[in-house]
Image (cartoon, helix red, strand yellow):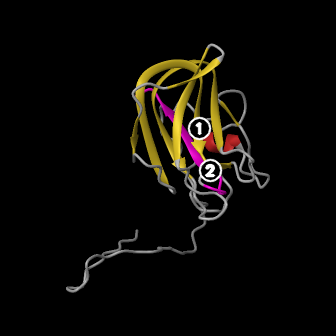
Amino acid sequence: RIRVVLHRAEEATGTGITEFQAWGSGTTLYQTPPPAAGNLSTNTSGVEFPKASASFHDRYGGVPKSAIDGRIIFRPNPVNRWTSYGSPNEADWLEVDFGKPKTFSRVELHIYDDRGGVQTPTSYKVQYLSGERWVDVKGLKKSPETPKGSAKNTATFEKVTSQKIRAVFTNSGKARSGLTEFEVWEK
């Protein structure tokens, strides 16, 4: 058990911690908690559905399936994300195929930003497959309104039923976009 208490000095305007580490001689490996129940896009086994694909993925291990494995890690290691680093495109997308129609009205995009070649996109939109066409969701509300890196970005919209959903990212200058997790929720 560890407890940290920070007291603000009289003349200071706030308190904070940059990093906190705890070390010990524990014999049990840390177990990552399971993903939250109800996330339609989680695939911890990596087989069958749902499955992820993208317009482009980097050559260093940032593959689409890593963005639906239920693990949210903003650090550079382990490589647990999808990125479009090296993409020739001004915009890139990450898609989730559920294998059969699902109903959803919210996504949570955990945007990866390494402050180098992968940075927060300037904007994003959410689309679903209707027949053979990708259609923008209706009533899109974003929080935060402007994408924020190394953070959860929530988008809510009118409920839709489709087999596929995707997020389309407008890349920031020469940098490209990335996600550590793409969550899809019914509510």
The residue type indicated by label 1 comes to Val
Real-space CA distance between mark 1 and mark 2, rounded to the nearest whole angstrom: 10 Å
The residue tagged 2 is 177
Judge left or right: residue 46 versus residue 74.
right
| Residue 52 pos. (x, y %) | 67, 34
Q: In front: 117, or 6?
A: 117
Residue displayed at 61% across by 62% down = 114
* Viewport quadrant of the N terminus: bottom left
Q: How many marks?
A: 2
Residue displayed at 59% across by 64% down = 115
Position of residue 184 relative to residue 59, above or below, is: above
Q: In front: 71, or 140?
A: 140
Indicate which disc, 1 or 2, sits on the residue closer to the N terminus: 1
> Can residue 174 be found in the magenta stretch?
yes
- Numbered range of the magenta stretch: 173-187
Q: Quadrant of residue 49?
A: top right
Residue displayed at 43% across by 24% down = 138
* Viewport quadrant of the C terminus: top left
| Residue 63 pos. (x, y %) | 72, 45
Q: In front: 80, or 58?
A: 58
- For disc 1, the neighbor class at 10 Å (few under 14, some 14 to 19, many from 20) is many
Judge left or right: residue 7 versus residue 98.
left
| Residue 67 pos. (x, y %) | 62, 43
- For disc 2, the neighbor class at 10 Å (few under 14, some 14 to 19, many from 20) is many
Q: Secondary structure at mark 2?
A: loop
